[in-house]
Image (tube, rainbow, N blue to C red):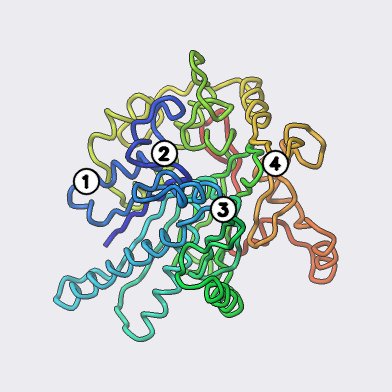
Amino acid sequence: MKLHVFYNGTDSNYTTDFRKLGRFIHGEIVSRFGHYTQAVDDQAVNVLRIHGVGSSKEDGNFLTDKTGTALGVRMRSDVQNIVSFVMNARLRLKTANERGQVDANLVVTFMGWSRGGIGCIYGAHMVCKVWDDIEKNDPSGIKLDIKIIAFDPVSGLGTNVRALDLSWLDVTFMAGALWLSHYTGTLKDTVKASLNIISKHLVNWWELPVHVSQFHGFYAHDERSVGFAPTMPTMVGADVGRNFKLYGVPGTHSTLVGNLYPDGGATAGVAASPVGTHVYRSMVKKAGDLMTGWGVVFDNTIFEEWLKPLDLTANFALGVIVVPSSEALTTYKARAQSVAITILNPLNKVSTGLTDGRGVYIGGNKQDRKWKPESSMVEFMNEQNTKSTIDSVWQMVVGSETKLEKLGGSVAAHSYNRAGSNWV
């Protein structure tokens, strides 16, 4: 059995974003793949699509809309829905197998952007935990196999609460009082319950255990906005037959999934960037190649409606490659770096040497030294893991370690290849 989860980013509604003009001329990538996967009739029941947190939630209200955008409120319930979706499928498959319809594998593919990407990582971690707990008391004979494509998995402000189990707290302040969205009762009881949860249920949710056989993370090289540090998860356990890859992508958090303007917006009367288009079609091809390799089936309309306008064939092969010059790519990247959301930190617009890079959470809950503009993904990940004095002293004791080595297993880094429209 194959399941498919598509989790949109903050304020990204898959219903409207699928055909959204302006910022996403050809469509936001997670919405599009989700649409063409769900449109296959006999596959639709096994597809879960999730609106991004914030104003995208169709059943939200003013409070959860605003706190969802700012702080990621309702991510926890989304993750619980993912766990329920997988466990219900497990029960259906187990029952069918007991009746003679044998399928010994449950393959779950995840695709998510931004907080949706974090939700995929967190959801996969929780699915593995719950699965193992259930299997102890109710063996099914089914092998769980999880595959993840995450586009710039950013937890953002407010949801940077690391190491919490399904007790992940959605916290915000309203009228000076503490408001926790997932609990009822008095404020005293809520605070008491949350403190108990924090003390007893600490987990490293960024760790992806052996059930996760594939992780492909795409990271925007030129994003500089405050609160947009992405997470690179750790491979835990044996690495045989597992494949974790990290890809550096030119542009911003938004251009990575289909915004064709280097500033992440849409300026009236201004043509989309040919460099942005070049990067976007590379992303569509790469994600499509991965998913078809995993046996994901797409509706036949995908070619005429989406791939053909991008000069991609029905099997995601590139047509004519118009390679942007190195100068054009440099200009595109510089423009992307200069238009960060800088309300909280205007220094991000200035090349100070301290604030001009991008922070990254690498296999843990502490932000790594900033990913500098001059460093490719491969160069950055092969730097020594010395983001603080404590780390430096620790490495003197236990030996040197690169950022890539910190992630464990056989994780590999890949930089964007402009000429080939791919990654090397």
Dividing the image into 4 quarters, which one contains the N terminus? Answer: bottom left
Check disc 1 and report its element: helix, strand or loop: loop
User: SS at mark 2?
Assistant: helix
Q: In which quarter of the image is residue 284?
A: top left
Residue contact between numbered discs 1 and 2, judged by CB atoms under 8 Å: no
- Which residue position is annotated with label 4? 344
Give the numbered dot on residue 40: 1
Q: Nearer the viewer, residue 103 or 394?
A: 394
Q: How crowded is mark 4: few (under 14 residues within 10 Å), some or many (20 or more)?
A: few
Mark number, residue 155? 3
Say which residue label 2 marks: 29
Circle 4: residue type: Leu
**Quadrant in which the C terminus appears:** top right
Counting residues from the start of the chain, the first of labels 2 and 4 encountered is: 2
Amino acid at dot 1 = Val
CA gap between label 2 and label 4 equals: 29 Å
Is there a contact, CB below 8 Å, between mark 1 and mark 3?
no
Q: Are marks 3 and 2 in contact (CB under 8 Å)?
A: no
